[in-house]
Image (cartoon, coloured by chain):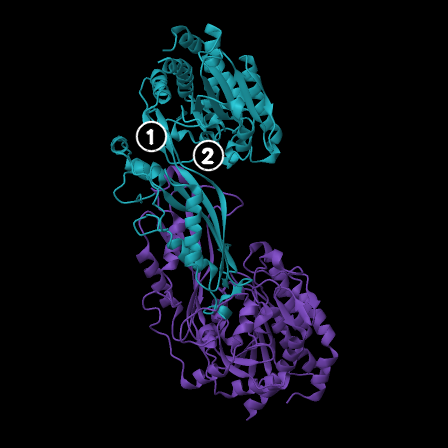
Chain colours: A purple, B cyan
Amino acid sequence: MLPQRVAEEIETNRQRYVAELTDFLRIPSVSTDSEYAENTRQSAEWVVNKLKKLGFQTELRETAGHPVVCGHLVSDASLPTLLIYGHYDVQPPDPLDEWVTPPFSPDIRDGYIYARGATDNKGQCLTYFEAMEAILAVSGKLPLNVKVLVEGEEEIGSPNLGPFLQANLDELKTDVIAISDGSQFAPDIPAITYGLRGLSYLEVGVQGPRFDLHSGSFGGLVANPVQVLSEMLAQLKNEDGTVAIPNFYDDVLELDPRERQEMAALSVDEVELRKYLGVDELVGEPDRSIVERKTARPTLDVNGIWGGFAGEGAKTIIPARAGAKVSMRLVPYQRAATINELFKNFVYSIAPPGVEIQISEMHGSDPVLVERDQPAIQAAARAIEFGFGKYPLFIREGGSIPIVGLFQEELGCKSILLMGWGSPDDGAHSPNERFSLEDFHRGILSAAALFYALEESFEA
Amino acid sequence: MLPQRVAEEIETNRQRYVAELTDFLRIPSVSTDSEYAENTRQSAEWVVNKLKKLGFQTELRETAGHPVVCGHLVSDASLPTLLIYGHYDVQPPDPLDEWVTPPFSPDIRDGYIYARGATDNKGQCLTYFEAMEAILAVSGKLPLNVKVLVEGEEEIGSPNLGPFLQANLDELKTDVIAISDGSQFAPDIPAITYGLRGLSYLEVGVQGPRFDLHSGSFGGLVANPVQVLSEMLAQLKNEDGTVAIPNFYDDVLELDPRERQEMAALSVDEVELRKYLGVDELVGEPDRSIVERKTARPTLDVNGIWGGFAGEGAKTIIPARAGAKVSMRLVPYQRAATINELFKNFVYSIAPPGVEIQISEMHGSDPVLVERDQPAIQAAARAIEFGFGKYPLFIREGGSIPIVGLFQEELGCKSILLMGWGSPDDGAHSPNERFSLEDFHRGILSAAALFYALEESFEA
């Protein structure tokens, strides 16, 4: 599948690829924080420069938020087109004091590179560019026409990507899309993801008195916003861990027999998992396997809460206000818009007197299900088998990649390859995020093989 | 009661008293902030100098924190002794930008003096000194022996006052204690406080996974510490606003018929109160008046909560930990130590699997009830009637004054006079703290009358 000389070229350049990744990871492109706006743009320019070196026609494209990097390399107009998607922005690095080495000073330890963005998504995105570099170095041209779309707002929900796609439908037209933002199922167990959970993310604000009150003078008279918020959050879940919002499960698709069988076969070492997480017990819906619970069942989590005095010592106040961020992972065929409405209606309906509730919708996305039995998916499976030496599992993922729904809807593309080279324990979104250098290498091999495998599948 | 000549002396010197108060208020004696340590000591020295001018034997007494001012003026060894308590420290002035004039540049507007410490407690404390000055100017001696105890750590919880009392029991022995740190019930409605609520203050920590987790990858598997904390906090209260901790009410003393009658007679303008607080509805225990709820019934309030991501935007994590500060106002005969135990036992008992709970005790104090029908209290009432032209109400206060419990326990003194000249809307602890010059004057008259009224009550 992959010409031997390309594989050799990749082997030869391993160190240089790592150096380039290190360079990319030094840029603190935290898209959610306006303080890093300059760095975020710098990260986009890094991608533009890299693509230009490969011969891409490329530039920064402005949006209402962070710019999109768009690139084109036409090999032969008669060939099919692959669009590679990635993102150059990263999650905030907090809590900073839990990092062993600083998040934007990449450090290599025991075969891993540690930095914010290492696995999510700079390292994985870069594998495609290095793969193309190797192919171009050896054969001068790619087996397919390639489009690249690297955005800077994935970590804030891609608010401007939809409008960008809509405005550039012809330019972005493609036969297959490879999404570089995934992971293996487990270390050394590569996978292709055919299902993604969606997301409803809302913020609930509770306003009580117009200023913090002395709890001695007013305790017993005034509804306490933190207490009210706690009581409302408590009512969102049932004792068995299921979500208590009425009609929440109405549109949930039950697993088909093949899926249940596959999921049952995915043995998860619960003892190891508990140890990794540092918890003495896992929780969740009864009668559902771990894999089902984390990939094919909807959930609700409070992502953050605040209110009143959180400093050292004691301050005896009734806080004026409190708030929480709450998100729900959705599964086919739930819809984010519907779930947002159900959530709001329920929370408003349980709000007690004496406070004012305000709910705002943050970003959301619909869940995704990709048809598994299509040629492009099977080509991707062969490419992974080449890079990792193992045929991939077919799995559903617990996370959400909002842009996949966008691609389906806006570009009308049904051949979406969701696969990643990192490992679930890479700590994406956590302190000490990392990416195995071995996975980085196998990723470059798989990405290179993918170009040839797709070419073959189209020829067939 | 008060000799006419003393009243005239007080009238004659009104302007000078205000000038002295202005001088005292210029000193930024913020005890909680080490940057002001020098000023805090300067404030103590101001008190020493004032007392020395009155003929007191007095000095600064060092503690582990800010010094205590201790003074003695023996009139006649056979007379009973009054101990006057006050504090020379003040609350931090933040938020500074909300002050109309700077907090330590006293400004007189519309009959009020505006400055941090004006009412709490420099202005009120000074009334006793000016009262003694007038008596001494007219008659050369006081009708009682007087001890003065002015501390510099009231605003940080008087951490060193207990040890100081214990170390100086004989020196501080007294028949009556006047606490200068109170207020009227409402503007022009003076009061004597015979009950104070106590306080149990605890912090609850919930530890879940050992780091923040991606809610997509792990949502549905792991107990969420914020969710757990919310559910536990929700279980602390019943739907009717009462506290749900088992045995919490066991030691609560029911109001006697006279108290219920008095409290019922204290009309609170609920519409005005709601407007002031900015809430559309008051809450609390059913079948209890507003005054009962805020002064004579125990309460539970969450003072602060934190956990996970509270920044701008959306972060999809399961937080590693969450925490809350919870305090309970206690009433006679609840005990802080007992309530702490009940709280801890209950919270530990409802903790679900998958998390670790840690509870730490912050400061606390027992509630106080002073016997109303004793001669010293009645003497104080007559003194207030003289100064304010109105017989005082007898009330309970919703807040806690930990030093009162200390005086009862350490000095064994049961005659504790809790009364103040300021108004609840003076803005103690708030920006634009003020003290009415009329209240300052009436306070000096009342304080002067108190010496004579107590003398008469002891003679009787």
Query: Can residue A75 be seen here?
Result: no
The numbered mark, 1 or 2, whose residue comes first in the sequence reads 1
Q: Position of residue B233 (x, y in %)?
A: 40, 53
Query: Pointer 2: what residue?
Result: B402
Q: Is residue A17 above or below residue B83?
A: below
User: Residue drawn at (54%, 59%), measured in percent from left and top?
Assistant: A32
Left or right: where does residue A8 sit relative to residue B333?
A: right
Q: Quadrant of residue A363?
A: bottom left
Q: Amino acid at mark 2?
A: Pro
Which amino acid type corresponds to the residue marked 1 in the rendered image? Ile
Chain to which mark 2 belongs? B
Nearest to the observer: residue A141 or residue B154: B154
Residue A142 in the figure: left or right of residue B215? right
Q: Total of numbered circles in the picture?
A: 2
Disc 1: host chain = B
Residue B286's disc is: none
Real-space Cα distance between discs 1 and 2? 18 Å
B120 horizontally vs A125: left or right: left
Q: Quadrant of the N terminus of chain A?
A: bottom right
* Mark 1, residue position: B395
**From the viewer's perspective, is residue B204 above or below residue A111?**
above
Q: Position of residue B395 (x, y in %)?
A: 33, 30
Mark 1 residue element: strand
Report the residue at 62% width, 77% height from top. Answer: A128
Residues tagged by mark 1 and mark 2 found on one chain of the structure: yes
Determine whether the residue tagged by mark 2 lies in a helix, strand or loop: helix
Q: Quadrant of residue A67?
A: bottom right
Q: Position of residue B157 (x, y in %)?
A: 51, 36
